[in-house]
Image: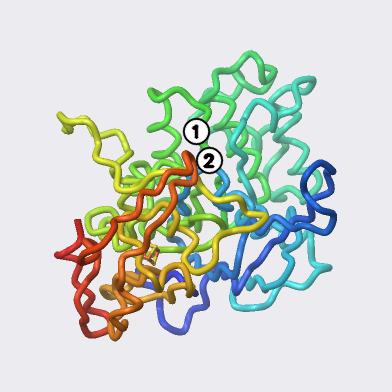
Amino acid sequence: MTSVAAVLDTPAQQAPALEARHLTKHFPVRAGGLVARGALVHAVEDISLILPRSGITAVVGESGSGKSTLARMLARLITPTSGSIFLDGAEVRARARRGYARAVQMVLQDPFSSLNPVHNIGYHLARPLKVHGLDGSRSMDEAIAGLLDRVSLSPAGQFTGKFPHELSGGQRQRVAIARALAVRPRILLADEPVSMLDVSIRLGILNLLAGLRENDGLTILYVTHDIASARYLADVIAVMYAGQLIESGPAARVTDEPAHPYTQLLLSAAPDPDRTQPPSLLGRGAPPNLISPPGGCRFHPRCPHAMAVCAAERPPAITVAPGHEGACWLHARDLTAAQSLPLKTTDVSTGADTGPGPGPNPGRVPDTEPGTGSREEKS
Ligand code: SF4
């Protein structure tokens, strides 16, 4: 899969706010033990992603899928092994760090560890204002009060003198967002911003992010393992599995008609208050070892629809509807009979054979025109 389509009404001549092209990150394994020296963790492989201006794009995946590594590369906290990043259409060069940090800010998952416990809230907000320069029309106190007001922490006087441990988790995350806003960024990268918060206050943070897009035109990348919250907040959802992008498209479309069996698995595992029966999980096992990931489709050891071709070749991005792509051989046409044979797979968590066995593959979509791949016959 090579790109996420911009579904917002962005003028054609306007460059995306942020774009990743073929980003890859391999981490060297330095520990001893059974892992040979020189081994690499293939954390992110060849991901291209477009963040439309003033849009909210969600990157969804389970733990270890590489979504946070992708966000950290986009924030330039870690250096890609290969690939390029484009800001407002211009390739980002290694040196322009401060200018980039002004435009692109990151909010981390844990608001407690991201705030220094020995400094009060006023200090946390004053520091970036001093480093990056104040809007000259306001005093420092006015600027801090304005930031706290933008994240609905008011009156400001109640918060500036407090220390992080004196605030609730939700209030701490609001302070972390206010600190990111201090440099007047155009793009916010939010890495699991609600996953450490009580369920009751998650909605407030999601609504805060939605308001920042709505009122200030911020471009937002929302990284999450929770596909339900991604649907609530985002315009576009990109799904990652084992370091690769495997599906992307408009949020409602991806969640209503998922094209990839892994997205179906994520959705079937998501909490659903209307569900009366236990979820039927379309998949099994655990994510693969990224030091030696499976060949072909990385999901094939877990996929209930795996075919012979899935173990042999990586599936390309296939358009299943306008702006909606899935990297899955089920949507390919012109597969040979041999390629379509059901694959006998091994449950990676138990080692047991779990393949669909002989007979027609239940997940196979009949040959269709590219871009119109029907999924009616999928289970
Ligand atoms: Fe991957 Fe094949 Fe399953 Fe599609 S059908 S998800 S390509 S294993």
Q: Classify residue 256 as left or right of residue 52.
A: left
Q: Classify residue 189 as left or right of residue 354.
A: right
Contact (Cβ within 8 Å) of mark 1 with mark 2: yes
Task: Find ligand 1 in the image and state its quadrant.
Answer: bottom left
Q: Ligand 1 near label 2 (Cβ, under 8 Å)?
A: no
Q: Classify residue 223 as left or right of residue 128.
A: left
Task: Please state which of residues 22 and 201 is positioned toward the viewer in this rendering.
Answer: 22
Question: Residue 226 at what x, y percent from top left?
Answer: 41, 41
Residue, disc 2: 192
Q: Quadrant of the C terminus?
A: bottom left
Q: Amino acid at mark 1?
A: Ser
Q: Is residue 21 above or below residue 218?
A: below
Q: Classify residue 305 as left or right of residue 123.
A: left
Q: Is residue 122 above or below residue 93?
A: above
Task: Please state which of residues 179 and 33 is positioned toward the viewer in this rendering.
Answer: 33
Task: Please state which of residues 248 and 214 is positioned toward the viewer in this rendering.
Answer: 248
Residue, disc 1: 195
Classify mark 1: helix, strand or loop. Answer: loop
